[in-house]
Image: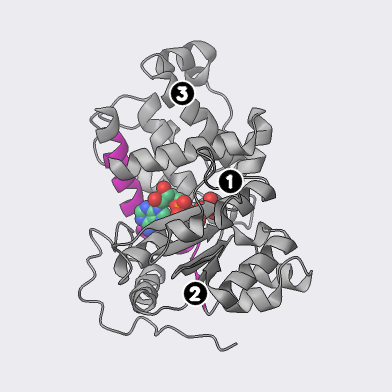
Amino acid sequence: MAVETPPSHGENLSDVSFTSGLHGLIGASPAMREVYSQIKYLAASRANIFISGETGTGKEACAEAIHRASPRSAAPFVTVSCNAMPPELIERRIFGDPSESAPTAPPCALRAADRGTLFLDEVSVLPLPLQGRLLRFLQSGMAGRTLVDVRLICSSSRPMLSELASGKFREDLYYRLAVVPLELPPLRERGGDIEALAQSFLRRFAREQGKKFDPLGPDHIAALEAYAWPGNLQELQNVIRRAVLLFDGPDLPLRALPAVPPAPLGQTPQTVEAPAQRPASTETSHEALFEALAGLTLDQIERLAIEGAIQAAHGSLPGAARILGVSPSTLYRKRERWNDAQRSA
Ligand SMILES: Nc1ncnc2c1ncn2[C@@H]1O[C@H](COP(=O)(O)OP(=O)(O)OP(=O)(O)O)[C@@H](O)[C@H]1O
């Protein structure tokens, strides 16, 4: 199957505002300008798109930006996270329930996304029988007895070549889904974007919490840029959200940001892996923590705990669910609720 190659960023990007970002995406590094250029090109085409990139690099945000820039933008953008539910629930979510008239049946995502876009997040985890069903949908366009017009955007944070080589993912399906492959760069390769992103997250979370923070200074930025960000933008966002919840302005203490361990001889700090957890300090003792959490609602504390677990599980919802002793679908439902609240805010 032929693979379309989007033009590289030499094309005219004059209508893209890098200060406000493209459809909510922030960043003006060369790597992101290349991505914006591809998004603009892909938005106009009907081809299925496959977005790859490390966990938390913004694959869902990028899929939504493509939808919003496309002629389909007036129709729904529907997301199904394939790693957040057991396979039988995913199947019902994507293809619908045979007893769909039941009031509790989940809506069929393919029909909900008719004329719009269906984003299948972490599609590589779909079991082989479901991959077969997806392939049949691509061949027929039929969701049950209804003919639908859906553009598919899929994503994976796993390297697809090894998934194909090991037979876990069907090659014939992959090449139909990845008519256009798009690779998102990790945060550590986005140069000065870390500063723009961190300042924007700080403004947003401070506003949400009704707190006032001064913009981050050169020391904050140096600390953020020295860190490896294995969880990418998701981790950066979590770090800033937690800092805003735990501290009062106007200055953000440097200890609110991830610490970079001293580099061993011959190694630069940027190549050092992020520590899983910062060592406890007196400020994070039980009393200080209780004091810091005292102003928060139970919902906010729960969200902090869940996001901390997702981060500790390197972005995996099932991993976070194991840490917290709940089912992945519980976390999935909560995340959907936050996303809905964020969209309607
Ligand atoms: N360029 C960007 N500018 C501003 N915010 C961004 C950008 N990219 C992503 N984000 C935000 O970062 C967070 C993580 O992004 P997103 O969920 O799209 O990543 P992902 O790669 O789909 O994650 P996962 O691998 O966990 O599925 C989201 O809150 C998203 O809104």
Query: Could you say whether the residue bearing mark 1 is in a helix, strand or loop?
Result: loop
Q: Which mark is residue 48?
A: 2
* Mark 2–mark 1 distance (CA, rounded to whole Å): 35 Å
The three-letter amino acid code for the residue at tag 1 is Ala
Left or right: 313 in relation to 100: right
Position in image of residue 230 (x %, y %):
56, 51
Position in image of residue 65 (x %, y %):
35, 63
Looking at the image, which residue is at 36% across and 58% down?
76
Q: Nearer the viewer, mark 3 or mark 2?
A: 2
Looking at the image, which residue is at 25% across and 34% down?
207
Mark 1 lies on residue: 274
Residue that lies at the very extreme toward the bottom in this rendered image: 2
Residue toward you, 148 or 287? 148
**Ligand 1 neighbours mark 2 (CB distance < 8 Å):** no
Q: Which mark is residue 158?
A: none
Question: Is the magenta region chiefly helix, strand or loop?
Answer: helix
The residue stretch that appears in magenta:
180-206
Residue that lies at the very extreme toward the top in this rendered image: 287
Position in image of residue 233 (x %, y %):
45, 51
Looking at the image, which residue is at 22% across and 66% down?
17
Residue toward you, 127 or 17? 127
Looking at the image, which residue is at 39% across and 83% down?
8
Work out which quarter of the rendered image holds the C terminus and state it: top left
Q: Mark 2 vs mark 1: which is more N-terminal?
A: 2
Mark 3 lies on residue: 301
